Amino acid sequence: MSSSLPLVSLDNDGKGLGAFSPDWPANRVKALDWNLLREDVSLPVAVLYEARMQHNLAWMQRFMKAYQVKLAPHGKTTMSPVLFHRQLNEGAWGITLATAPQVRAAYHHGVRRVLMANQLIGRANMAIVAELLRDPTFTYYCLLDSPANAAQLGSYFAEQGLRLPVLIELGVQGGRTGVRNEEQLQALLSELARWPQALALAGIEVYEGVLTDEDAIRAFLRRAVDTLRTLATHAHLRQDGPAILTGAGSAWFDVVADEFTGLDIGVPLDIVLRPGCYLSHDVGIYRNAAERIAAHNPVARRLEPGLLPALQVWAYVQSIPEPGRAIVAMGKRDAAFDAGLPTPAMHYRPGTAVPLPAPGHWRLRAMMDQHAFLDINADDDLQVGDMIAFDISHPCLTFDKWRQILLIDEQYQITGVAPTYF
Amino acid sequence: MSSSLPLVSLDNDGKGLGAFSPDWPANRVKALDWNLLREDVSLPVAVLYEARMQHNLAWMQRFMKAYQVKLAPHGKTTMSPVLFHRQLNEGAWGITLATAPQVRAAYHHGVRRVLMANQLIGRANMAIVAELLRDPTFTYYCLLDSPANAAQLGSYFAEQGLRLPVLIELGVQGGRTGVRNEEQLQALLSELARWPQALALAGIEVYEGVLTDEDAIRAFLRRAVDTLRTLATHAHLRQDGPAILTGAGSAWFDVVADEFTGLDIGVPLDIVLRPGCYLSHDVGIYRNAAERIAAHNPVARRLEPGLLPALQVWAYVQSIPEPGRAIVAMGKRDAAFDAGLPTPAMHYRPGTAVPLPAPGHWRLRAMMDQHAFLDINADDDLQVGDMIAFDISHPCLTFDKWRQILLIDEQYQITGVAPTYF
C-alpha cells in the first residue's frame, strides 16, 4: 500500500518557514538546518514533534492490531499526504476522506485506497471520482443514505460504464446523515437493486461521534452489525470483494473496536476504524476522550503511555501594552478556537538555553484574526520578542490554517515539512 | 501603482473548481466555460459576484475621494493578489497587511506599497522585510509600540544597513496593541532617537476597531491627530517622505474619515484608511456596521446603494434524513462560523431555470468540520442534490478557507479565479 509521494517545492508565498532558495524541494528541508530556537523560522509557525507523532502512529496501529481491526485514519484532519504516507507505512489499510476534491488530492499524492466517509453529491464531484475509478489500482468507497442519491449515482455511473462501491450509512434520530429506520433502509435497497451494474453495495458505515452516551453508542453499533449480517444473509452485498463494516471517529474508537472485534458474518469482512486526530492528538477535546479511554479500555491501559499532544503553534509576544496583558502575534488565522483556545505550554527567550514550561496562570482571553490576548501577572518575566509555544484543541481546524506544517525534533531542529491540501 | 501579476496555474489539488487540463493558467478560467448552475464546478465552492464586487470597489474609492483621504485596503481579509490589483487599479494608495509572510506574498505578486498594520517581531520576520526593502521601488511601513521592539528593530536594521519606516501605534486602555500614555510615548521616542540611521519615524497609526462607542472613538482619533501634530512640531518625523496618519477598520471608517479629513499639520501628510471587508462585504457584522454608517454619514447617503454582499458559498444538500432536517455538504472548513453562521440566500435545483430566494425560515442550526445542519419545514420542497447559496458573516475567516475563489457573473458563468495566499 506504500506509494510514491510526488516531489513538491517549498512555497515561497507561505508562512511559518525559514529562508530557502527558490524551488527548494520540500523533502529536503532538513538540509536547510533551520532551528526554531535560533529564530530561523518565521513565527507564527505550526510544528509537529516527530517523536511524539511517531509514538502516536505506533500506538494507534498497536491498538487496532490488538483488536484485529483495520485502520483508515480520517485524512481530513491533516490533509497532508506526507502524513498519510506515515500512516500507511505504519500499517494503515487506507485513508478516510470527506470530499471528492480531498480524494483527488490524496490520489495525486499516491494514496490508492480511500474510504470517503460522506455522500457523493453533484455532477462535478461524481466526475472527479469517476476519473479516479478508471485506475484499476484505486479502491474507493462512498456512503449512501437516500434513494434520491442512489438514483443520481446509479444514473451517472451507469452512463460512465463504471461501478461505484458504496456503503449504506446508518444514522440515529437527531443525528447527522444516515438511514434512520427499516423503512428507509428498504427503500434504499429497492433503489440500489435498480442499478446492479453501476452501484456495488459493499457494506455498512456508521459515525457514532454524533452520540455522547456509551450505551446509546453500543446499541447503535449493534444495529450496524445486525444490519450488515442481514444484508449478507440476503445476498445484498457485492460478491467481488470483502464486505466492509466501518465506524469510529477519534473519540469513541475504543468502544467501536470492542463492539466490532472478532465479528463473523459468514462472508469475508474488513472491519475498518477511522480515527484521524490521534496523529497530532491535542490538549482539549481529544485529551478528554483519551482520559475516558484510558480509564475504561484494557488494551489502552496496556499501551501506556497513551497518545501525546504533538502539534503546537509557536508565536511571538508582540506587545505588553499594559501590566498583566500581553498581545501575541497569533490569531484565528493560525489555530483552532472553536473548542477551547490554545493554551500556553512553553516560554522561550531567544538567546537563552532552553524553553521553560509556561506558568500555569498564563491564559488566552480572546483571539482576533491575527492577534491573541494573553493574561499574565504584572510581575511575570515576559518580554516583547519572547516566544510562546501553544498547545491546541481541535487539530482539524488548526491544520487547515497551514499550507505547510514543520516537522521538528526534540532539539527544535526542523526535520521535514508536511504540505497540506485543504 | 498598477503592477504585473505573475501567472499561476489552477491548483489540481484544490476544491471548488471544475475540470481543466493540467497547468491551465488561472487567468484563463473564463475560457473553460464553467457555469455554476450547469454543475460544472465541484461544490462546496466560494464565489465572488463580479458586479457586486465592482460596485463595492467603486463605492469605497468614491467615499475616500469625497473625504480626500487615501485607501490602503486591509489585504489580510482576502490575501488574494488578483483582488489587491483590482483595489489598486480602482485607485487604492497601497495594500495593508498583517504579517511579514503576507507582505512577501503581496510583493511577489506585484504589490509595491504596503502598510503592515502590525509590529514586526523576530529575526526571520525582520529578514523577510529586509530583503524586500532592498528593492528601492518597494515602500513599507510597520507599527511600533515599545522601546523593546524599537531596540530589536534598530539593532537588526542597522546591521543590515537599511532604514525601516515605522509608525507609532497608539492604543487605548483595555485594548490591543499600542502606546497607552505619554510616558510610554516618551520612552519610545527616546529609544527611537538612538537609531536614526535604522528607524525612520513616519507617523501615527491607530486601530479604533477595539472600541465600540463613537464618542470614545472620536476622542481616540483626536488624540492621534494631536500626537502627530506634536511629533511634527518637534521634528520627530522623518524628512524624506510625507508624514502618515492612518486608522480605520471596516466598521468605523466613516468616523475616521470624518475626523481626519482636511487635516493640516504643517508638513506633507498622507491620511490613509484601511478597511478591508468592503470588497466582499457580508450579511453579518459588516452589514450591521453599514447600516449605522448609512444612518449617520452624509457621504454614504449620497452614495446609495451602499455596499453589497458579494461573497457566497454554494453547497449541496447531501441528506434529508428526517422531516425538517437537511444536512448540507459545507462545514467549518468552508465558511466562517465565529460571527454568526452562514445564512441560506438562494435555492437551486439542477435542471431548473434559475435559483429562487431561499425561504426565510431555513436556518443553519450548527456546523461541523464538513457538514452543516439546516432546519427546514417538513413539507418544504427540498431534495438531495439541490444547491443552496449561503451568504456569510465575517469574510476574513471565509476567504482563508479557500485557496481559489471563483469570480462569477449574473448568469453564474465563471469569469475568473482569485488565488489566495494564507
Image (cartoon, coloured by chain):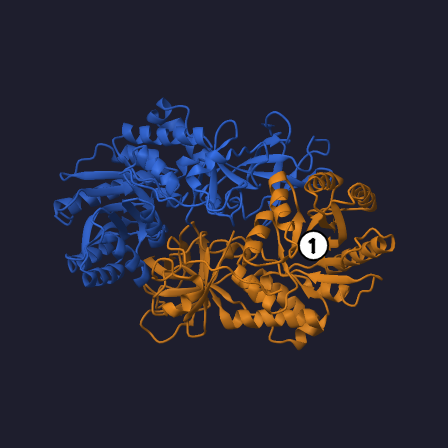
Chain colours: A blue, B orange
Horizontal side of A352 relative to B365 (left or right) equals right
* Front-lying residue, B287 or A8: A8
Callout 1: few (<14), some (14-19), or many (20+) C-alpha neighbours within 10 Å? many
Residue, x 87% and y 55% (percent of image)? Answer: B233
Q: Quadrant of residue A122?
A: bottom left
Which residue is painted at 71% across and 58% down in the image? B247
- Where, by quadrant of the figure, is residue A123 drawn? bottom left
- Quarter of the figure that contains the N terminus of chain B: bottom right
Asked if residue A135 is positioned above or below residue B406 in the image, the reply reads above
Indicate the secondary structure of the residue bearing disc 1. loop
Chain letter of mark 1 equals: B
Question: Image point 28% across, 49% down: which residue?
Answer: A170
Residue type at tag 1: Tyr
Q: Is residue A138 above or below residue A324?
A: below
Q: Position of residue B308 (x, y in %)?
A: 55, 70
How far across and how far down the image is residue A273, in percent?
A: 30, 38
Q: Which residue does the image show at 50% across and 27% down from the upper left?
A: A410
Q: Is residue B311 left or right of residue A189?
A: right
Which residue in the protein does label 1 denote?
Answer: B207
Q: Is residue A256 left or right of residue A228?
A: right
